[in-house]
Amino acid sequence: MRHEPITFRPADPADATAVAGIWRTGWRDGHLGHVPEELVVARTPETFAARAAERVGDTEVAVVDGDLAGFVMVVGDEVEQLYVATSHRGTGVAAALLTHAEHLVRRHGHPRAWLAVATGNARARRFYERRGWTDEGPFDYPAQGPDGPIPVPCHRYVKDLASPDPSPR
Ligand SMILES: CC(C)(COP(=O)(O)OP(=O)(O)OC[C@H]1O[C@@H](n2cnc3c(N)ncnc32)[C@H](O)[C@@H]1OP(=O)(O)O)[C@@H](O)C(=O)NCCC(=O)NCCS
């Protein structure tokens, strides 16, 4: 059982380096062997640093004991990225982050959230299923590559959210 409080806040530019590190490590954990080699080659450390800096405005971070434990990026009704630092996996941070992301989708005015997960990312898929998300089946997600989109075998997961969140936070 976790006792340290988990707090959430919008990312600021000073978080970009920590976000990039969690993103890069987590991306490799969840994707190596499950996505085209062309995409693995394209996802250099520099690309994570650049994308983390560009996407600060879409990012919310989870903080535990002053440590940046994970982050989520929500765009409209899509939970686009959800990553937890290795040392905080299996602790409840991920579930809290996902609940937070669902609140953000609701606050954006959407009754249903969706996300894409790589077909071979068994840990993430198990995690989403345990949190009440439904697998709507396979599709190819067009991941951004240096020379255009690279199709990645994914599954689309959805979750119907309860009535709109009345409490602005
Ligand atoms: C996906 C992620 C956010 C989940 O957070 P987490 O703290 O690891 O999640 P939990 O440990 O609470 O739950 C994972 C579930 O998968 C199970 N699991 C662990 N390793 C597994 C594996 N190799 N294969 C299948 N299931 C696995 C766990 O037992 C748990 O299931 P349970 O609740 O039935 O016991 C986290 O692992 C992560 O950041 N991974 C790398 C980035 C990533 O893949 N993000 C998702 C992109 S869509």
Image: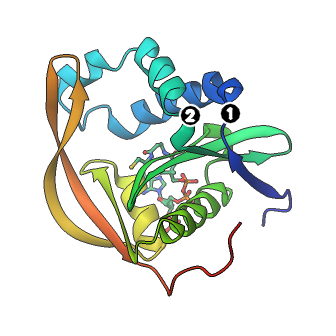
Vertical placement of residue 119 versus 46, above or below:
below
Quadrant in which the C terminus is drawn: bottom right
Q: What residue sits right under mark 2 in the picture?
A: 56
Left or right for 108, reference 2: left
Q: Is residue 18 above or below residue 133?
A: above
Task: For ligand 1, tell me if the residue under mark 1 lies within 8 Å.
Answer: no
From the top left corner, tell me how far across and down residue 2 is, in percent: 79, 62
Q: Position of residue 68 (x, y in %)?
A: 72, 38
Amino acid under label 1? Asp
Is residue 43 shown left or right of residue 15? left
Q: Is mark 2 within 8 Å of ligand 1?
A: no
Residue 112, x across and y down, in percent: 37, 74
Q: Residue at x 59, y 31 (%)?
A: 19
Are there few (<14), some (14-19), or many (20+) residues within 10 Å of tag 2?
some
Residue at 17% of width from left, 66% of height from top? Answer: 137
Q: Residue furthest bottom?
A: 163
> In the image, 27: left or right of 136?
right
Residue shown at the point (42%, 54%) measured from the top left: 123
* Drawn side of residue 97 relative to residue 69, left or right: left
Q: Secondary structure at mark 1?
A: loop
Q: What percent of the width, then of the height, locates residue 146?
A: 22, 17
Q: Nearer the viewer, residue 35 or 143?
A: 143
State whether residue 79 is above or below residue 166. Answer: above
Residue that carries the numbered disc 1 in the rendered image: 12
Query: Cβ–Cβ below 8 Å for labels 2 and 1?
Result: yes
Of residues 126 and 39, which is closer to you in this image? 39
* Residue type, mark 2 in image: Val
Task: Please tell me whether mark 2 sits on a helix, a strand or a loop.
Answer: helix
Tally of numbered tags: 2
